[in-house]
Amino acid sequence: MASFLLVGAFFIVSRLFQTGLQYSNKVERRLTAVHLAEKRMLDLREWARDQGAWNGFPDGPDADFPTYDIKVTIDPIDLLSPGRELESLYPGDRRVMSTVARRATVLVSWAPAGQYRLTAYIAKAAGTWRANQPIVVTRKGGGVVGPNEFVEFTAQAFDSEGKELKDIFFHWTVEPVYAGNPTTATVSSKAPSGRRDGRKAVFENKVRRRNGSYVATNGDCRVVAFARYHGETARGVSETLNLKDL
């Protein structure tokens, strides 16, 4: 009886020891997969910053752990600015950034059926404004602007490499030309294609009085577009507008 109990105890301890080894092996494999996924995501971030691109990233298993299969996928993503909760108040007219970031997924697989997935946003290296004319303001049409006449303006932003920046939001204002006959007027953003990016604006020869009514003005002014890019503000100025109140 004692021998039987002793053999049974040894059997139970052996099974527990074997189960512990199997569990320890599973944990070790998963920790290795987590390490490989984080390492590959870090390499991908550095690649995006150094190369200035998302495509062309070398894929495949890690040289030190060839038994782990690693796959990287990069998908476009639309980010809402300044946030999803605020932009949800403007259905069909949201401010969307579609070129500043991508969603990267690193999938690490190992035999027999283990998988670990890591997902994160990646972005290119922070750029700077173009030194000369970072924002170009273009007027549609020309000539003197009479009472209650409308003029459409378009703004374009450029980085230090001369590439146009797509995910930029513009704000508009009017400034008098003090060297001439200074005056002011009204300018407001126009949402093209259902996006409140301020890329287009409408200028009108009118100013609001204290009683709430509007009146046309006479003199010289300019339309100015402002935008921020990686924390730095730039501005673009239109040609001088000549306003006539008659």
Image: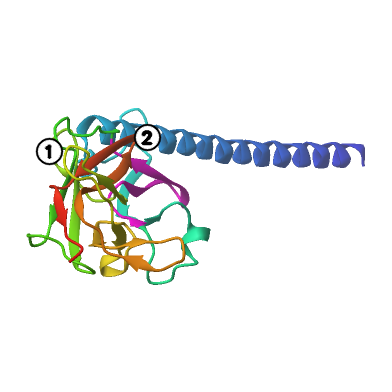
Q: What are the residue bounds of the magenta stretch?
A: 96-124
Dot 2 falls on a residue whose secondary structure is loop
Give the farthest residue toward the front.
Answer: 246
Q: Locate residue 27, reporting x and y percent.
A: 58, 38
Position of 231 relative to 139 (above/below): above
Q: Main secondary structure of the magenta part?
A: strand
* Horizontal side, residue 118 vs residue 176: left or right: right
Q: Is residue 29 visible?
A: yes
Residue 185 on the magenta segment: no
The residue that disc 1 covers is: 162
Q: Locate residue 156, reporting x and y percent.
A: 18, 49
Q: Residues within 10 Å of mark 2 (few under 14, many from 20)?
A: few
The residue that disc 2 covers is: 231
Q: Can you tell which quarter of the image residue 195 is in?
A: bottom left
Q: Quadrant of the C terminus?
A: bottom left
* Horizontal side, residue 231 vs residue 13: left or right: left
Q: Residues within 10 Å of mark 1 (few under 14, many from 20)?
A: few
Depth check, front residue: 152 or 210: 210
Q: Is residue 62 visible?
A: no
Label 2 sits on what residue type?
Answer: Gly
Depth check, front residue: 111 or 161: 161
Q: Locate residue 233, reporting x and y percent.
A: 32, 36
Q: Quadrant of the N terminus?
A: top right
The mark nearer the N terminus, 2 or 1, is 1
Q: CA distance from mark 2 to mark 1?
A: 19 Å
